[in-house]
Image (spheres, rainbow, N blue to C red):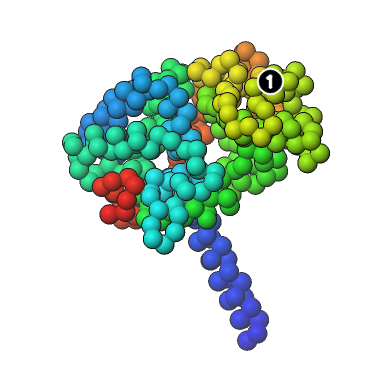
Amino acid sequence: MAVQKRVLSIFLIQLVLLAVSGLNRVDGAGLRTGYYDESCPDAETRALKTIRKAISKDVTVAAALLRLHFHDCFVRGCEASVLLNATKEGGAEKDGFLNLSLRGFDVIDDVKSAIEKSCPGVVSCADILALAARDAVQFQTGGLFWKVETGRRDGRISLSKEIDANLPFSNFNITQLKQNFASKGLTKKDLVVLSGAHTIGSASCLTINTRLYNFTGRSDTDPALDPTFASELKKKCKPGGILPVFELDQGSSTISDAHFYKAVRQNRGLLISDAALLDDHATRAYVKRQSTSAAGATFGRDFGKSMEKMGRIGVLTGSEGEIRQRCALVN
């Protein structure tokens, strides 16, 4: 009897672990391209038109929307919880420290409004996030493109306390990065490929200040950072400074190419997490391959595959979740 109880207990624990791991599954069951072809045939056209208008006013919106999609998928899955406002019960994801610099919420709202005029209550905010990230990056850079499967539904829960345990920090080492991505069902290749999103975008002086002035708590600079590059950054980024903002891919931040990897290989990656890509055999090998002009041509294809995979993390489909009327509020 004692043995039977022990076996039953182990079985129940395994069931719980499987249920928990399912929260970040990368299977995409229920998703497909052209999901709205019949229910809202002009949804993707309306989204693209609205995104192009936003990018024409501010090209930096592309990186912002890509980051918004990433931050959504890594917490609770790609179900638009990052868009929800706080409730009386507590702060939402957008209120967490790592998410305070997120922007592009207004663009998502504009896309949602444009689509609602044609097909009210049909297209989810989660799908709009996925489409907006792809369309914004493709329109700005003219290079990166990937298929966006649709059919996601929107989640009803958003908690700021879940941020730190799910999002990767910019000062993560390679072990922490691999563990973080693996917890979402993503491989080391996905890690190094998706880090290539830093081919566009920027980071503030505040983000790199410790790396420049107090890396180990002894008023030192990260030895993994090219000394000349560090000196250039220090001329603009002063101790304790918040601004200015620096391009993540110096001199190539509006082009979707593999230049980012060349910078990382030369120890000129802006973030600690960028430099960490050189500390694992597999990720370092990819960085080296992409830093050559010939191999760099495959980056766009690889990035598209990893983005499609990321877009399947923990999705809600079928009767799960809801289709929000307004992206910041649960129905």
Of the residues shown, which amino acid type is indicated by label 1? Answer: Lys
Q: What element carries label 1?
A: helix
Q: Looking at this view, name the residue that lies furthest to the right.
A: 218
Q: Residue visible at 58% across and 50% down? A: 164
Q: In this view, does 50 lie to the left or right of 285?
A: left
Residue 11: % across, % down: 57, 71
Q: Can residue 24 be seen in this view?
A: no
Q: Residue visible at 58% across and 52% down? A: 165
Q: Which of 229 and 191 is in front in this view?
A: 229
Residue 95: % across, % down: 47, 48
Q: Residue visible at 52% across and 34% down? A: 306
Q: Looking at this view, name the residue that lies furthest to the bottom.
A: 1
Q: Quarter of the image containing the C terminus?
A: bottom left
Q: Quarter of the image containing the N terminus?
A: bottom right
Q: In this view, does 273 lie to the left or right of 82?
A: right
Q: Looking at this view, name the residue that lies furthest to the top.
A: 293
Q: Residue visible at 74% across and 26% down? A: 225
- Residue 288 picture quarter: top right
Q: Nearer the viewer, residue 320 or 53?
A: 53
Q: How crowded is mark 1: few (under 14 residues within 10 Å), some or many (20 or more)?
A: few
The residue identified by callout 1 is: 235
Q: Is residue 230 left or right of residue 12?
A: right
Q: Can residue 175 be seen in this view?
A: yes
